[in-house]
Structure formats: structure tokens, C-alpha cells
Image (cartoon, grey):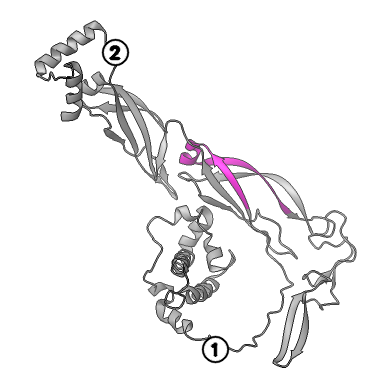
């Protein structure tokens, strides 16, 4: 499965446009083939370009967030592309060859002790073939963290509240300065007293044991869009784990996998199947009822139909994801059943026909006639 575009750029899912742009420039500077000669750098650079191409456009990003890569991989290909709308190569090259001589003693960011967004969750869901074609409502069961209602997520017993950690004074970090002949070095580590939260809970909530959240199993009804395929990803907002310190919950990502069907196969938005007919139906032509995902449909078999002829039923395929009005076609491959045994009467009639057609061969007449009929038309 392809890597997540947010992961490729190293940004969170709620990153704004400027954060995405900044991350893209930083990654492009690092992996540009003119700068990075390591094996795989060029492929990584292409990945970065593709990720930014999708996430920098609000409409494309919205489709990706909801359906995953399947909804955005139609026309664009990864690789070297015109970046005029991506900030331009000029900006990238300006930053590629500048900034490498920056100060060695940069500032250290103070650990954030405010609200923290909850973790995203993943669920794999299997669908039957027709469920994927037409979509619909599906009930799922998930287990996630929900904010404790007793302590409102604080982790402290009702009537009490956490206090600021005295070890780190609420920063969540402790610093140690080491002096050497080459200068002073500052080592920053997570505060061992509060584990980086900046707060200490003295009286823990009995309901959640001071964690501020509880594991809950629940049922959800989700809507499956028509036309989903293997690997399609659906985003269910706010159904991930609860956030910390009144932070927003994460999202639930449902990855879809489609069960094989005995009769139908899928090729993009087209549906493929096979139809076996007798040699007489192929020679004379006929009308037959065939199965489709929409139910039985009449199919005209023209006289003289050859083996492996592909016949098309328009607009009987898979709806296009995000545009269910547009559908693919149902492509039916015609297979012809030539009998290995005939009654005496059938053989006499076919021998007479073979004689009339003048198609007797060294293969015994009948076999030669049938073989020539299906290969010389």
C-alpha cells in the first residue's frame, strides 16, 4: 500500500497550507537530485512532489482525506512536473543552497503543555463485490479512547485539579548544561516527574485511574460511497482516540478491501464476465438473458459470432468514485461450447452442411468445417 502523503511531508493531518508548503520546501531541499546523490533520493523527491501536489489543493486534499489515494490518482503522475503553482523552483533553489551555514547553537523549542490532539485509528473492512459497486450503509464496531465523563478528561478526582509540576515548572522538560573546552552544551530530556505533561495529579480519578480517558467499544453506521475499490480509505471525523488536556479527538480511517466474486471481475470502472453459448447459437445468432450487477439484461448475439468476442453493455459497470452518475461498462467475453459427442442425426446434418460448404478436410469433415467456420469469418 502507498505511503500516506501527510507522513511523506512530515506534517499532521490538520496542518494548514503554510505548514504544508514549508514542509514541502524542506523535504524538497533535502532530497533534490542535484543536492542528494544517495540511492533512492530521486524516487523520494518524486514522492514528495506528488504528496504536495495533492495536499496543496483544497479540493484534491479533501478527496484524499475522505477516500485516500484511489480518488486522486487518476490523471497525475509522480515525477518532475511544472512547479509554478507550488512556490516555484526559484524558491526551492534559493533555500537549497542557503541556510546550511546557520548558527550551530540554535534555540530549543519549549514543550507544549496545552491541548493535544488524539491519535488517529485504522480499521480494515471487507465488502462484497456489489456493496463496493453500489455503496450503502454499513455498521462497524470500533474500540477507542473516550474522554472520561467523571473528571472531564483532567484525570483528577472531582473537586480537585492537577498542579503544575515543580520539577520542570510546567514545561514538561528538564535541562542539563555541560561545560567542555569546546563550549557549553545543553541536554534537554522529558521530565521524569510528570512524564512531559507539565502537570502532576495528586488525587487520581477512580473512573479512569488518572488517565483522563477510558477504552470504549461502540457501534457506528458509516456510508460507503458507490464505486469504492481495494485500498479506498474513508475518513470518519472525530472517531479516533480522545485528545489529551481537552484536545480534539483523532479521526478513524476505514480501509476497504473487496471480496472476489465468482461471476464478475473488475477492471477499473469496467466489469468483466464470461458467457458460454453453443456453436449453433454462435452460428445462427440469438437473444440471451445475461446477469449483470443491475440484474438480468438481454444481450443480442449476432449470427457468426466468433470465440472470445467481447460484447459491451454500456453503463452497466462500476460508478466512478465521487461521481456515481458516470459508470463504466460491462464487458462480456463470449465462449463457444463445441460438443465432443453428437447424435447420429446431428452428425448427418452437419456432414451434409459441410459438404454443401465444400469445407471437408483431412480432419474428418465435420471437425474441419467447424474449425474453419470459427476461424475464417
Kindly indicate the quadrant of the structure image that contains residue 265: top left
Residue at x 44% of width, y 76% of height: 87
Distance between the alpha carbons at the discs numbered 2 and 1: 87 Å
Residue range of the region highlighted in magenta in the rendering:
122-145
285 to 355, vertically: above or below: below
Please tell me whether residue 290 is drawn above or below residue 73 in the rendered image. Answer: above
The answer to whether residue 377 is seen in the rendering is no
Using the image, tell me which numbered label, if any, was put on residue 101.
1
Q: Residue at x 54, y 88 (%)?
A: 101
Classed neighbour count for the residue bearing mark 2: other residues with Cα under 10 Å, few (<14), some (14–19), many (≥20): few
Is 128 one of the magenta-colored residues? yes
Whole-percent x, y for residue 306 in the image: 23, 29
Residue 354, located in which quarter of the rendered image?
top left
Q: Residue farthest to the top?
A: 344
What is the magenta segment's predominant secondary structure? Answer: strand
Q: Quick check: 152 left or right of 18?
A: right
CB atoms at circles 2 and 1 under 8 Å apart? no
Residue 195 on image: x %, y %:
79, 69
Q: Secondary structure at mark 2?
A: loop
The C terminus, quarter of image: top left
The residue identified by callout 2 is: 341
Rendered view: 295 above or below 73 = above
Drawn side of residue 240 relative to residue 189, left or right: left
What is the x, y in percent for residue 135? 50, 41
Extreme residue toward the front, this view: 362
Amino acid at each position: 500500500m502507498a505511503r500516506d502523503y501527510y507522513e511523506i511531508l512530515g506534517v499532521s493531518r490538520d496542518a494548514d497550507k503554510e505548514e504544508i508548503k514549508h514542509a514541502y520546501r524542506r523535504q524538497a531541499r533535502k532530497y533534490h537530485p542535484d543536492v542528494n546523490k544517495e540511492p533512492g533520493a530521486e524516487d523520494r523527491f518524486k514522492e514528495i512532489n506528488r504528496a504536495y501536489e495533492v495536499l496543496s489543493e483544497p479540493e484534491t486534499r479533501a478527496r484524499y482525506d475522505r477516500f485516500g489515494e484511489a480518488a486522486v490518482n487518476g490523471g497525475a503522475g509522480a515525477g518532475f512536473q511544472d512547479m509554478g503553482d507550488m512556490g516555484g523552483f526559484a524558491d526551492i533553489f534559493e533555500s537549497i543552497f542557503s541556510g546550511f551555514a546557520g548558527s550551530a547553537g540554535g534555540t530549543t523549542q519549549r514543550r507544549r503543555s496545552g491541548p493535544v490532539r488524539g491519535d488517529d485509528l485504522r480499521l480494515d473492512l471487507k465488502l462484497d463485490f456489489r456493496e463496493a459497486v453500489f455503496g450503502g450503509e454499513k455498521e462497524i464496531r470500533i474500540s477507542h479512547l473516550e474522554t472520561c465523563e467523571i473528571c472531564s478528561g483532567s484525570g483528577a478526582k472531582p473537586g480537585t485539579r492537577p498542579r503544575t509540576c515543580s520539577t520542570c515548572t510546567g514545561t514538561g522538560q528538564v535541562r542539563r548544561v555541560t561545560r567542555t573546552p569546546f563550549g557549553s552544551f545543553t541536554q534537554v530530556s522529558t521530565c521524569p516527574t510528570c512524564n512531559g505533561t507539565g502537570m502532576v495529579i495528586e488525587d487520581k480519578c477512580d473512573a479512569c485511574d488518572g488517565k483522563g480517558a477510558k477504552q470504549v467499544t461502540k457501534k457506528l453506521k458509516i456510508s460507503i460511497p458507490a464505486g469504492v475499490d481495494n485500498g479506498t480509505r474513508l475518513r470518519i471525523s472525530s472517531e479516533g482516540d480522545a485528545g489529551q488536556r481537552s484536545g480534539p479527538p483523532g479521526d478513524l480511517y476505514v480501509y476497504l478491501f473487496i471480496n472476489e466474486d465468482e461471476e464478475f471481475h473488475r477492471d477499473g470502472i469496467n466489469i468483466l464476465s464470461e458467457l458460454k453459448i453453443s456453436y449453433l447459437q454462435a452460428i445462427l445468432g440469438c437473444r440471451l438473458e445475461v446477469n449483470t450487477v443491475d440484474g438480468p439484461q438481454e444481450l443480442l448475439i449476432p449470427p457468426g459470432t466468433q470465440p472470445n468476442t467481447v460484447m459491451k453493455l454500456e453503463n452497466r459497470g462500476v460508478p466512478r468514485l465521487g461521481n456515481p452518475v458516470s459508470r463504466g461498462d460491462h464487458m462480456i467475453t463470449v465462449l463457444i461450447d463445441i460438443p465432443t459427442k453428437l447424435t447420429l442425426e446431428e452428425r448427418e446434418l452437419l456432414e451434409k452442411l459441410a459438404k454443401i460448404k465444400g469445407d471437408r478436410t483431412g480432419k474428418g469433415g465435420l471437425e474441419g468445417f467447424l474449425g474453419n467456420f470459427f476461424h475464417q469469418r
